[in-house]
Image: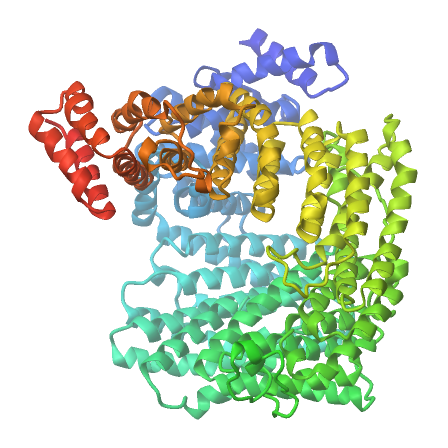
Amino acid sequence: MEQEISQLVQAIAIASDPTQAALHQQALGYINTLQQNASTTWRLALTLFVDRNPEGTPKYSVQTRFFALRVLDDFFDNRFEPLDSESFQTIQQALVSYIQSEYVRGSAEADATFLRNKFSHTLTLFFLCAYIDQWPTFFTDLFTLIRPESLSGAAFNHHISLLFFHIVLEISGEVADQMIKSARAFNQARHNRDGRVRDAVRERDAARINEAVLTIIAEAAERMATLRKQDQTSEVTRELNANIEVADWGIRTFGSYVGWIDINLTITPTTVPLLFGLLADSSLPIRLATSLSLLRIVAKGLKEPTDKLQLLKVLSLGQVLDALESKTRTQQIERGSDIDEGEESYREALGKLFNAYGQELAKLVDECPNEAVRSEASTYLAQALPIMLRFMADEYDDTSNTVFPLLQVILSGYKRQRKTSSEPIDESKRSFLTSLLEVILTKMKWDEEADLDDPEEDDNAEFERLRAELRSFLDSILIVDQDLVINAIRTLSLNTIAAYTNKVNMKWNDAELGIFLVYLFGEINKSGGRGRSAFCHAPAVEKDKRKEADYSEYPLTPHGEMLVALVQSGIAGYPHRAVALQFFETVARYPDFFKVRKECIIPVLEAMIDSRGLHNESQAYRSRLAYLFHRFIKTERNDIPPDIAANILGSIRDLLSVRVKLPELDDPESDLLTEAAKSPELDSQLYLFETAGVLTSLLYRTPQQQSTILLELVKPLLDDLSVALPEAKKGGEDVLPIVKVHHLVMALGSIAKGFPDFPAVPAPDYIFPPLDIFAQMAQAIIVCLEAMNVWRVIRDATRAAFARIMATAGPSVTHFIPVLMDNLLAHFQPSELVDFMNFIGLLIHKLPSDMFDVLDRLNGPLYAHINALISQPASGTDDQRSQVDTKRAYLGLLNNVFTAKLQRAFTSERNYAQFEALLGLLLRILEDTSDPPSQKSTLLFFQRSVSAWGQLPDQLPVDGAEGNTGLPGFERFIYERLVPALFRVPSLPGFNIKDGQMTVVLHETANLLQSIYKTRGQEAHDYFLTLFLPSQNWPQEAALDFTTKLRTLDGKNFRKYFTDVVRSSQAPS
């Protein structure tokens, strides 16, 4: 063994020394192997840990001994049966001898406290293995070391006391702490062993453990009181700190086991005063540990409600916490701005304890069948409510949050009572709710020192979450007493706005709260009506006459009054961005208000475009304002006069330039171009360009002015494109010119997006927008695409921008579509195909009469790309998802072609040669049972195909109306390939008729079968009856029944019949 020990010690030394790189990994591998074989190497580890030099000091280094404990841990932790007798005695004797030499006579590893903690854990694991059958006297033996009988008058041994506490803490964690148990994989043997140990401790030693713990704590507390009265010499201070340490760990130990041993042991006439004395001790760690122990006592489950109530009465926590809350709040006020985080954590701990106390009382009130218990608990709970409000009103949110669970329980009870009774709430509850509302509204106020301009400030996000929670409490109170909430919010908001109007000096957070409450009012006022009726008391007006109606003569609702006061107050000019931003958030939130008080539109617009809004110095602020400005203009555009629109455009002209800022990449593997193309800065710029388009569109009654202004907006962008394009075409490492082109293309598209869509059928008096300018924009974008189609960001931008221009300019830009398609497909990534096909679908929807030639040219190349993509085996989940998305988008496009009656593109002279291959691809998709939605889309396509191309010659319209020109030979495809596939799909291994999506596939199959019969008539009937069904081994009677049902049943009943046929065919025989 000496050689093994020497080798292991050397390996640990090398593994602990990173400078020995050559042998480092080899040494780690060696010691890991030893640890993994702990069942055979534990003796070696035990020797390494306990062996000592002749002078009594540990023989091996701290690192070596720590590793030895890790090996012993692994050996003990995986044993759920007793050790053999020899092994047990060896370990027991070695560890007891170590405790006597190191803890009784030594310094308890004073130079390596982490080793002391590790040993406590190791000894606990050994205890779990041996306590039940082999070492039942474990605690008895430990108690003799804490204060030997020969020294009965002496103080407890400091080191042994702490070791005892640590062991009991570890035992509680192992056998009773559900958090620790849930963090590791469940093991039935461990679970059973822990249960047996827990029961054995309760039966054998719980009383003595509790007595020892409390006695040591009491002695330490008494000694602390004595020492605090003496002069604080270094020796006195050292002894005082030692006793504080003992009391701290002792009360922690007490709290660890109160939840799983008899409550009669832990709560006695002597323990209660001891605990409350420690709860008010000058030592913060002791107070925190005591509050946690009391919380666990309060939360302990007791079978009888009377026992729980008696426990709460014995503790008198209501009175104790009332006094401590008042005391700590007074101290908090005296400290002023001098923050003491330790003392605030103590108030937080008291809040948690109070919350547990209140919840236990509320549980008795709500659940106890005993009326006397409920009544008494209700009295205590009512007495506790003012204390809860004081905790909730704490300026520190962490303390305030502690009582939120209790408040939620109380309000839930109030809501239940409200639902069962129409009577007004009693005065005591109303008084409580009034006080609660005051606290909630105060807590909704920002901290005056908050830095709202810092997006990385975690406290800001925390406060937003707090506001959301407080809002949920308001909603609860609203259910109980709506008028109380409405009046409180309205009063505070109007008073705040009035104070600002009267030039009363006001803090920014008070002003922001007043505006926020206007914002909030519309969301919580459930009886305020909708639309315009939320803001004025007007009679019902027919929908088509609302635009002409004059609402200014009607009186305002409370919310309308608040908004008028808000706009007229000029509070948007408050010199703090949070106040102005909340103002703009609020006015943009309620566009219908400005339909009833149109005179308020201009003041809001003035504020939005000056230094209070879009011309503010803060970039982040301007970005948010760009969105709010866009939202406000879009919703109010019909009420903005053309001259005002022109003036606004002039005021924001300096903001309508494309600025490029390359982002800093957090992930080196991210693509700089891709990240730059989706930057938040770009989004805010695009909102402004779209808003400029909206404002320009309002000038439609003066076409010349509109054309001039639009050109003034567009020409700088086109000029910038002409400068950036040559630089971008050079390529190289500088991506800035490419990003610039991308942003400019997106800006052009956004301007077009601001205009209304081109009408499907223009009215005779329709005033067209400047189509020639939109054509210039489209031309410029196409030129950029032709030169830069190798860049995906340019292809994406072109697709998006052209879709917007096309929606505005209609047929005037369709001649660009062929070259657009060619360039988009010249270079593409598979993931782009979905967006490309959605784009084509949009074109078909907007311009069906102009798309035949485009589809005729596109059909072949697109089919080739799709077929190649979905025929490749998927290499992973992402590939599989991409294939499914592409397939579904393609099927959607094919069906859109039919919807637009452009199906001749499939069978044109250019595409006829590959038509059969297309049908084959669709049949393969139909037989893929892993994707029912695609199966359904394929069946819809075939239904339309049969109706269009499968008609009998005498049924064809003379002029080929609606594209139904018939297709010679298509009936062979129906009978030889389509019908067999329809009957084959339900018999495929992956077809699960219990899956609801598969039922939909069956229904669409039945629809297609009926479509075939209706299209081909008697021919189809005879084919099913005499050829196909007999070839599938259908009995003659069943075939006749099928064809009869096919001919006579309506769609709904035939779908049910066909589904039943398939279900019966799959039933076990």
Say above or below: 35 vs 750: above
Q: Is residue 850 left or right of residue 611?
A: left
For this view, does 954 lie left or right of residue 90?
Answer: left
Q: Of residues 664 and 218, which is closer to you in this image?
A: 664
The percent position of residue 514, horizontal first and vertical second, equals: 69, 80
Quadrant where the image shows the C terminus: top left
Whether residue 368 is situated above or below residue 1045 in the rendered picture: below
Q: Is residue 315 visible?
A: yes
Task: Residue 693 in the image: state x and y as whole percent.
Answer: 77, 59
Question: Which residue occupies the extreme left position in the image?
Answer: 1037
Relative to 961, is 6 on the left or the right?
A: right
Q: Is residue 358 above or below residue 246?
A: below
Residue 936 position by quadrant: top left
Rendered residue at 68%/35% (across/down) = 111
Q: Position of residue 1058 (x, y in %)?
A: 20, 37
Q: Nearer the viewer, residue 478 or 336?
A: 478
Q: Position of residue 312 (x, y in %)?
A: 40, 72
Give the residue displayed 48% in from the left and 46% down from the top.
Answer: 169
Q: Residue furthest front?
A: 958
Viewer-proximal residue, 494 or 372? Answer: 494
Of residues 61 and 733, which is closer to you in this image? Answer: 733
Residue at horizontal 73 percent and vertical 79 percent from the top? 510
Quarter of the image for residue 997 reads top left
